[in-house]
Amino acid sequence: MEPKIPIAAITDEFSPDLETALEAMAEIGMKAAELRVVFGKNILDLSEEEVSRAERILQARGFQVVSIASPLLKCELPGSAPDEQFQHDIFGSSHVFEDQWKLAERAFRIARRFNVKIVRVFSY
């Protein structure tokens, strides 16, 4: 029986290489992906050419993108107490508070490009 919602995972949880990740995901029956780190970069930091390359790879393997796992709001809130556990670069993102409007615009532009309605964000 085909699931009513696509079974998906964040590709870089399988492999940092998109094609390797999609191959492994397909082997266990997945047909959808969430994008976070692609080609060694955070999805929002990809060039337009790299986004197009990712699109081609996903389409060639018959994968649907279900969401963008953005680093939006993954920063320290100005004026808040420092958080020693906070890691800026754990998923290829080193953006600061001042970058958030630009990141939001980029996240929504990429989401529209992949025709997805979900963009993950953090809460500082």
Image: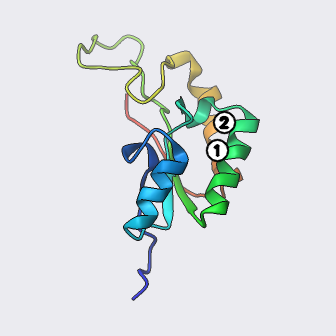
Q: Specify whether residue 109 is in view.
A: no
**SS of the residue at dot 1?**
helix
The image shows residue 5, relative to residue 46, as above or below, that is: below
Is 84 on the left or on the right of 90, as rendered? left
Between 70 and 17, the residue placed more toward the observer is: 17
| Residue 105, numbered circle | 2
Q: Amino acid at mark 1?
A: Phe
Q: Quadrant of the N terminus?
A: bottom left
Q: Residue at x 28, y 10 (%)?
A: 82
Q: Amino acid at mark 2?
A: Glu
The image shows residue 5, relative to residue 59, as above or below, that is: below
Q: Quadrant of the C terminus?
A: top left
Circle 2 crowding by C-alpha within 10 Å: few under 14, some 14–19, many from 20: few
Mark 2 to mark 1 CA distance (whole Å)? 5 Å
**SS of the residue at dot 2?**
helix
Circle 1 crowding by C-alpha within 10 Å: few under 14, some 14–19, many from 20: some
Residue 118 placed where, x, y %?
A: 52, 54
The image shows residue 38, relative to residue 77, as above or below, that is: below
- Pointers 2 and 1 in contact (CB under 8 A)? yes
Is 27 on the left or on the right of 35, as rendered? left
Residue under label 1, please give it: 108
Between 80 and 8, the residue placed more toward the observer is: 8
Q: Residue at x 37, y 45 (%)?
A: 13
Instruction: State which quadrant residue 53 falls in.
Output: top right
Between 88 and 55, the residue placed more toward the observer is: 55
Q: Specify whether residue 97 is in view.
A: yes
